[in-house]
Image (cartoon, rainbow, N blue to C red):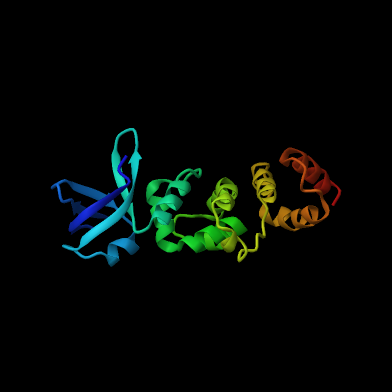
Amino acid sequence: MIGAVKGKLIHKTDSKILIETASGICYDIFVSDRLLNSSTENDTFFIYTSLIVREQEMYLVGFHTWEERNLFDLLITAKGIGPKQGLKILNDLTGYELRTAIVTGDVASLSKIKGISAKKAEQLILDLQEKMQKNISHAEMSTINISLPKKKMEILLTMRTLGYSDTEIKKPLDEFCDSCDMEMSVEQLIVLFLSFLRNK
């Protein structure tokens, strides 16, 4: 696996840079707009990389920092997030902004990113919130107010699949979660919430 590349930046396009190493090997690397705009041809360049292997292709994606690379690798484990969209997210949000949005369940901030709908933002939070909490420092966690627990998000997504609209369920869901024991399993909570709705 190629974890990083160091060499001279000899060419760049609207989405990639070409780096020639001291041994004469050239690497074509996809990068974010932010990294692309800050790079200059003929500069010596050091870039962290993630190797993407697909059925029909194999390519490198590059990052300024190790933190960005790790966030990217985490992002593309989420349902519906591919490498190009992962790069787009990292281009639009800093590492801190991304971690904060996911940990706090901030759908509004995530859905401002081109290609990320509110539903996709919610799925991203559902898939990554727990993983992100494990990878965040105690100092950083202390600055973040977690506002939407994962179980609440799972109930919301389940109710959508049952045909309920956000308008129908968001207010009752807030009331339910405030009055219910959220230590129960998601399955138990969904059954109780359906009963709660019927009695409204």
Q: Residue at x 34, y 33 (%)?
A: 55
Q: How many marks?
A: 0
Residue toward you, 57 or 99 = 99
Residue toward you, 104 or 169 = 104
Q: Residue at x 40, y 56 (%)?
A: 88
Q: Position of residue 5 (x, y in %)?
A: 26, 50
Q: Residue at x 57, y 62 (%)?
A: 140
Quick check: 141 left or right of 168?
left
Rendered view: 119 above or below 101? above
Rendered view: 199 above or below 188? below
**Is residue 76 at least partly visible in the picture?**
yes
Quick check: 16 left or right of 130?
left
**Is residue 119 at least partly visible in the picture?**
no
Q: Position of residue 200 (x, y in %)?
A: 84, 52
Residue toward you, 63 or 102 = 63
* Residue 9 occupies quadrant: bottom left
Q: Residue furthest left?
A: 24
Q: Residue furthest right?
A: 199
Q: Position of residue 164 (x, y in %)?
A: 69, 48
Residue toward you, 198 or 139 = 139
Q: Residue at x 75, y 42 (%)?
A: 190
Q: Position of residue 53 (x, y in %)?
A: 34, 37
Q: Which quarter of the rendering shows the N terminus? A: top left
